[in-house]
Amino acid sequence: MAGNTQTRRAFLVSLTLPLLGLAGLWRFLTPTRVPGSRRLSVPVSDVPPGGALVLPEDGVAVTRSAGGELNVLSLTCTHLGCRVNATEAGFVCPCHGSRFDHLGRVQQGPAQAPLRQVAHAQDAGVLRITV
């Protein structure tokens, strides 16, 4: 028993360091904003036919098919959460190479799920997006 004596300071240090580590991890374990808490308004005329309007600061892209159908996609890769980049052919994840078409469907893995569709409504030439 005499060889296992521990000072109060050593005990507090051994208790405090793991708690500080957990507090630091808390930043990564909690969302920075609540989904559905912001609303965007985008004029439909800003979305090019057969192309996309990318809003990187909001984490979404609005695509318009050749037939005029509008889709709002999250720019977060469904594989591990990296931010995808818009290209002529669709979207590409720079982290692991997943590729998605203009509708968010997986064209090449490792992602297995399509890009998430974002809630939106169209009213009088304005697209209202909930992010």
Image (cartoon, rainbow, N blue to C red):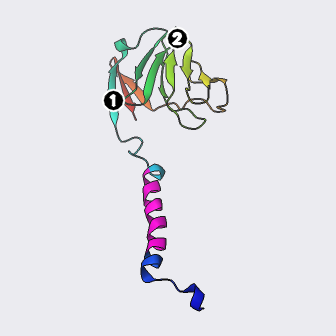
Q: Quadrant of residue 98?
A: top right
Pick the front one: 127 or 53 = 53
Look at label 1 and name its amino acid: Leu
Q: Quadrant of residue 93?
A: top right
In the image, taking residue 126 as reference, residue 8 lies left or right, namely right
Compared to residue 82, the image places residue 22 above or below, namely: below
Choose mark 2 or mark 1, whichever is in front.
2
Name the element at disc 1. Answer: strand
Disc 1: which residue:
40
Q: Quadrant of residue 125?
A: top left
Q: Is residue 41 magenta?
A: no
Which residue is drawn at the image coordinates 49% and 19% (left, top)? 86
Residue at the outermost bottom position: 1
Query: Where residue 32 sits: x, y (%)?
Result: 39, 46
Per the rendered image, the range of residues in magenta is 13-27
Pick the front one: 20 or 61 = 20
Which residue is drawn at the image coordinates 49% and 16% (left, top)? 69
Categorize mark 2 by other alpha carbons within 10 Å: few (<14), some (14-19), many (20+): few
Disc 2: which residue:
88
- Quarter the C terminus occupies: top left
Pick the front one: 12 or 90 = 12
Look at label 2 and name its amino acid: Glu
